[in-house]
Image (tube, grey):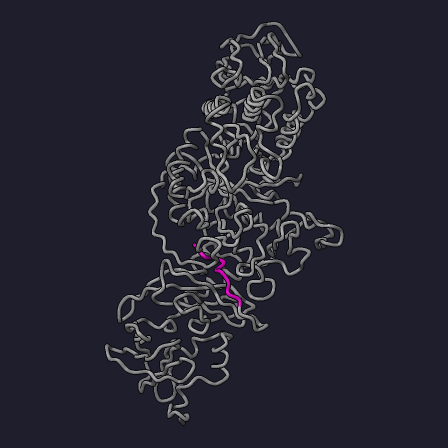
Amino acid sequence: MHDANGIDQKLLIPDADMERLRNCSHHAPHDFYGWHAVEGGSVIRTRQLGATRVDILIHNESRPATPIGDDVWVLGLPDIYTPDYRLCIHWPDAEPVVTADPYAFLPTLGSLDLHLISEGRHERLWDVLGANVRSYETALGTVKGTSFAVWAPNAEGVAVVGDFCAWNNNQYPMRSLGSSGVWELFVPGLGAGDAYKFAIQTKEGHRRDKADPLAKATEAPPETTSVIVDSRYEWTDGEWIRNRAHADVVNGPMSIYEVHLGSWKIGKGYKELTTELVDYVAEQGFTHVELMPVAEHPFGGSWGYQVSGYYAPTARWGSPDELRALIEAFHNRGIGVIVDWVPAHFPKDDWALARFDGPALYEHPDWRRGEQKDWGTYVFDFGRNEVRNFLVANALYWIEEFHIDGLRVDAVASMLYLDYSREEGEWEPNQYGGRENLEAVQFLQEMNATVHRAHPGVITIAEESTSWPGVTAPTEHGGLGFSLKWNMGWMNDTLEYFKLDPVHRVYHHNDITFSMIYAYSEKYVLPFSHDEVVHGKGSLWGRMPGDDWNKAAGLRALYGYMFSHPGKNLLFMGQEFGQTGEWDEAHSIDWSNLEGWGHEYHEGIQALIRDIHWVYRRNPALYSQDHHYSGFQWIKGDDAANNLLAYIRYGTDGSAILAVINLSGTSQPAYKLGMPRAGDWELVLNTDDEKYEGAGNDLVQVVATEDEGWDGHDHSLTLHIPANSVQWYRHRGSW
C-alpha cells in the first residue's frame, strides 16, 4: 500500500500519532522517530524543521530521505537490522550538518534510577535529571551531546527547546519513562554554554516553557533560561575535606562572618572575591564565612531567599566554577564555608517551579499548606517522595559539588507549624489534631540524617525562632537532627538591653541574664545577622546610646560580652567595624567608615574583633563547652544596680577564663568578686584599651586572689572595671 505520493504506508506515522507529535503531546516519540523494523525491512524517520534535504549516512553511503509532511523525513531499508547511521541535514544558505540521531539512543536513566526517584531516595539526583553532558562510543565514532531529563508526571508532552531549534517544541520531544513521571532525551551536539528550557504541554492544552528545576547554571537575571555546564573543576582542598571528616566542629571555635556577596563590595564577582574577601576574612580571624543564598533567584531584593534555581549558583556574580574557586580559596586559608539554604518555600514565577506541569507539583495542592501568603510564595509538598528527594539531594549537591561545610536552613519555624502566620480558618490540623507539620518534620529529620551520614563533619544550622523542642537533638532520639540553632531569644534580649541608656539598664537586668536559663536547651549560635540591620532597624552602631565615643564603647562591650557567652558567634558584614548605616543590598557596606572623620572608632572596633578572635581561638575555655552547663559558672549575676556581670568559662582542657562585664556608665575602681579558687588571673582582653580607642585605664595585668571570702566563695578578687567595657582574665594554670 502506498499513499498519494507513492510512499509505502508502512513507512508513515499513523495520523493520530502524527497529530500528537505535531502538538508535542505524545508520550513516546521514540516509537516513531529513529530506526524501526517494519514489515519487509526497516525505516528511519527524523523530523528536521526547515531542512531542505536530509540524507541518511549508512556505512559511509549517503541515501536520500523522503519528506512526508510536517518536516518529517523517512528512509525505507530492505534489511531488518539496527544500523549505526548519521543524519546529514541541509539547511537553506548553510553548509550541511552531520549529526547522530537523538532518537537512536537508549534512555539515560535505568530502572534503578527510576525506582529510587519514585521512592524519594536518589541521593545523586543531579546526575540523572536536568542536563548532563555525555558521550557514547559507536561504530561510527564518539557521539558527544547532552542528556535531558525532567520530572513532569502531569504533562501531556515535554520537549527540549532553545536557540538550537528556534524554540520550536516539535523538534526535540522527549519520551515518558512510564509511571515515574520522568521525561528523557539525549541530544547529540549540544554542550556547555547552550541555553535551554523544557516546553511543557499541559493536559489543558497550554504550552509552558519552564526553566530546568535541576539546571546547574542559568543566564544572568533578568534572563530566565537554563544553561548546560560541563564542569571539570580540579579541587586542591583534599586535605581540608579529609580533616573535616574528623573535626569536632560543634565543640570547636566558631566565629561566622555572614556575607551577601553582591554587596560586600558592589561590582565584585566570585573571581575578585576569591582574593579580596578571602584575604579580609582571614585577616580578621573568622573561622567560617556564611554566604547568604547563592542559588539562582529572580529578584535581587529577596537577597536570594526566594529561589528559582536550586541547583544553579546565581550567574549575577560569575560561573559555577568561579564559585568553586572561591570556596576552595576559603578552605586553603583554613576557613569553613556555610551556605544559606531555603527549602521552606519558592516564588510563584510562571517560568520556574510554580505549577510546573499544570497543577500543583512541587507545591502542596491544598492552599492552606501550599502557600505562604506573607511572602507571596508557594510551600513545598514535603510529603511527596519526589519533592522530598529533590530537596534532600539538593543539600547533598551543594556539599558534594561545591565542597561547602555547612547549610544554614532558613525559615524553619514556617515549616514546622501548620498555622505559621495564618489566621483561623487558613490552616488545617494534622491527622492528630495538632498544629505540627509532621511531613516537614520528617523531611528535616531525613535531610539532617542523610547529610550527617554521608558527610561527617558537615554541619546544619536551623534558623528557628520558637521553642520547638529538640531542634539540635539527634534524629534517633526524636530530634530534628540539626548541629546548631540560632539563638534568636538571646539576640533580641541582648539588643533590647544594649539600646538602653545605662541609667535605665538597672530596670532591665533580666534581659541580659535570662539567656542562661535556657542556654543548654539546644546547641546555639549567637547571631547578629542581616535581619537585624534592615527594614528600618538601623545598624548596631545606631542602636548604641550616646555620642560616637559611647557608641563605639558600647559596641566593643557588646562584642566582648558576646564572645564570652556560651554559644558560637555570628556577625553580619560591616558589624566588625561598626558600620553606621543600615544595610542596603544595592550598595556596598560602609567602607567609608574607615576613612575620614571618626574613622578611629571604627578602626578600633575592627582591631578589637581581630584580637578577640586571636584570644578566642587560643582558649578552649571560650568554646569547648559551649553546650554544657559545666562550662559556665556565675560569679556575679545579680548586680543590677551597677549593670555588672561576671562569670567563668571553663574548657575541657582544664583552662578557665573570667569575663567581667560593666555595662554602666560608671567605672568601678575596686570591685570585689568572690572566687571559687585561689590563683593568679592574667588580663588577656580589655575592650577599653586605648588601642581600640577606649579610655586606656591602666589596669593590672596579673591579679592575684585574696584569701578573704566573698559572696559565698572562699577567695576573692579585687578589680578595676572601667565603664562600658569588658575584660577577660585567663587563669594561670589548670582549673
Q: Is residue 505 magenta?
A: no
**Magenta segment main secondary structure:** loop
Residue 662 seen in this snapshot: yes
Horizontally, residue 453 falls left or right of residue 554, namely left
Q: Nearer the viewer, residue 456 or 92?
A: 92
Residue 292 in the image: state x and y as whole percent.
51, 42
Name the residue at 45% across, 57% down: 215
Residue 393 in the image: state x and y as whole percent.
49, 53
Q: Nearer the viewer, residue 625 or 718?
A: 718
Q: Is residue 212 above or below residue 251?
A: below
Which residue extends farthest left?
Answer: 60
User: Which range of residues does the magenta coloring cover?
Assistant: 208-217
Residue 458 seen in this snapshot: no
Count of numbered badges drawn on the protein: 0
Name the residue at 36% across, 79% down: 35
Q: Is residue 167 above or below residue 523?
A: below
Which residue extends farthest top?
Answer: 707
User: Residue 385, located in which quarter of the rendered image?
Assistant: bottom right
Q: Quadrant of the N terminus?
A: bottom left
Q: Nearer the viewer, residue 88 or 26?
A: 88
Which residue extends farthest right?
Answer: 424
